[in-house]
Image (tube, rainbow, N blue to C red):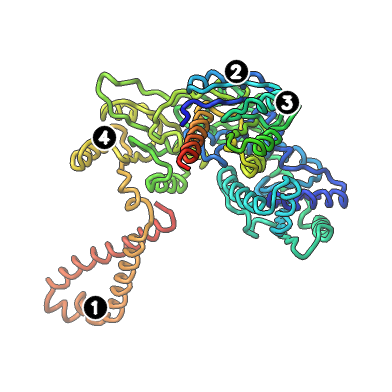
Amino acid sequence: MKETVSIMVIDDEPVVGQRLKPMLEDMGHQVEVFVNPVEAMEHFKNNPTDIVITDIRMDDMEGIEILEQIQFNHQETKVVMITGYATLELARESMAKGAFDFIAKPFKFKEIRNTISKAVDAIKAESKSRVGA
Amino acid sequence: MPIIMISGAPHGQSEALAKRLQELTGWPLLGRQVLLEEARKAGIKVGRLINAVIRSVGSQEKLAREKDLYLAFITKRLCESVIDDNLIYYGRFGHLLCPGVSHRIRVGLTTPMHQRVKNVMQQLNLPQEKAITYLEQIDADVEKWSKFIHRETAGHDPRYYDICLNLQHINIDYAAEMIHQMSELPEFAATKQSRRQLEDLLLAARARLLLAANDQTRNAELGVRAKDGVLTVTYMPRQKVDENTIKNALADLEGCREQLCTMAETSILWIQERFDPESESFSQINQLAQRWGAAVELLRVVPSTEAEKKPAQAEPVQQSAEYTGGVEDDGPEIDDGGLTRTMDELIAEGRFAGARTIYGDKKDILDVCQEGGNYSLVVIGDMFLEKGHEARMRDTRELAIGIRDSIKVPVITANEMQSRFLFGKRHLVRLLAFAALVACIYLLVFHFQEPILSLLGGKLHEKMKWLSSLAVAIFVPVVAYCYSTVTGLLLKAVGID
């Protein structure tokens, strides 16, 4: 069972990664930050992570597309969607397409910390059930 | 000519209907999505409101101000669009916007579920099962948004609309034609009065946004309303604003005939160790405040030893000027005893007069009460919680006496609220019982007039003068008591204290 998980943060605003990385590392996780979603997905193909935190509205690739790609190839990866252009529809669309959670910006550190803790618990539970099976 | 406000469920046909109407009328079109984007660009933290609805977070944050600003912004934007022009607006709660403007046509649009499912399947590329689940969730979210932002659950209530259209058997073209014809009715023509109402809504919304943009008034709890071009801003006692600060903040306000700044005078002070906006006490105090037109000031008392004592202070306000990309610092993690949530509810009700936390004992509470504003009532809620029942009762009683002597206003405990000021089931039973008793007395008196008159001044009186004196001495106060109880309860029932 994992205590430390790998997390990929994808947001075209560098400040988001700069702020999230130290906070997530303080939680004991391995964090990679990408500002280019296409590069991030290239990297993800060979180095999938346990959790992906992705912005939704980005120039080169939409967050929903990232979610769909990850869901298609790596269903075990938990995807957390973040966006400054949140609507109720976008939140529910993300969840319907398999996102683990959706957080509208602006949000506080504790909100993402709680979500990551829940995702880690879910990963641990899934890992335990696989071992049990 | 009128303003058309189309309200419909997500992924329905509201936009299609609005566009068809635009083709028929040539009037400008405005959608909810555009307003949302503009509000976001204007710096309103719409994301926080959305998080509060979909994730049920934010209960510890002050969202009432954010809600207020959001509503002020969309009201301003809508009013500016329609002040000299027609408009077709489509969204979810168009019927709740611009209240009181009589030249609105509020259209409630129902799109059949199978059509909505089909739309979702096409628009979001979801399979049918997921599309149905998605719509069920989004409908629930919309209902929550309605309660949260507009404090209304009027989504399906036909009383809120001028026309309700169900697209099950009519198509968009017919629906658009019907609304078009309706828009030509004289009943929906703009009148001087409805334009005035629109201008007042715009004035109040502009003022609210100017006050929010000003550093000195940003964090103040202010009541803003406009009537016939006269803007009234009400500020609560204890706030760091005054008439001059408010007038400076509103210096650039256009369209204002006169500005009035008033300090709310009547307020209820509610003292308690822990607050809960879902408690019965909150509901009762809110009811009373509503009836009196009073504002409620909260005083949270944290019992502490001398060493832990901290000075009385206003609640801290968190602010960050640095750009964070939407990832904000947590701020201090404090257990505020439900104060923020209660403040939020009171702000939303427009009845918030201030809040503070004091660390100390009875003496500190008395000091704060003496500094305070013009209270018309002090309510002592759950206090001295660490102590046993008897000691708690005694200390609460002593505190009540101390406050009453010190500031000379009525002081009651939260438990006495219902019996003293509010009309409940027990009062109803009492009212009915005493009303029946009074009726019986009058019936008996009028039925037995002869013997009564004989007792008071006739033959019986001649024989036993002492008996008539005794009867009057007993009977009159009993009747007076019964009658006054009935009238007192009746007045309480209609809200007159």
Give residue A92's position: percent from left, percent from top.
Answer: 63, 43
Mark carried by residue A38: 3
Residue of label 2: A18
Residue B199: x %, y % from top left: 71, 40
Q: Which residue is mark 4?
A: B405
Q: CA distance from mark 3 to mark 2?
A: 19 Å
The amino acid beneath tag 4 is: Asp
Q: Amino acid at mark 3?
A: Val
Marks 1, 4: nearer the viewer: 4
Q: Is residue B55 visible?
A: yes
Amino acid type, mark 1: Leu
Q: Is residue A13 left or right of residue B384?
A: right
Q: Going from the N terminus, do you reach mark 1 or mark 4 first?
A: 4
**Disc 2 to disc 1, C-alpha distance:** 97 Å
Is B438 located above or below residue B185 in the figure?
below
| Label 3 secondary element | helix
Residue A101 found in image quarter: top right
Q: Chain of mark 2?
A: A
- The one nearer the camera, A113 or B402, is A113
Q: CA distance from mark 1 to mark 3?
A: 104 Å
Instruction: Name the residue that disc number 1 marks.
Output: B453
Q: Nearer the viewer, mark 3 or mark 2?
A: 3
User: Where is residue A58 drawn, in percent x and y?
Assistant: 72, 28
Which of the two discs, 2 and 1, sits closer to the camera? Answer: 2
Residue B341 or residue A125, whichever sits in front = A125
Q: Earlier in the sequence, mark 3 or mark 2?
A: 2
Say what secondary structure mark 1 lies in: helix
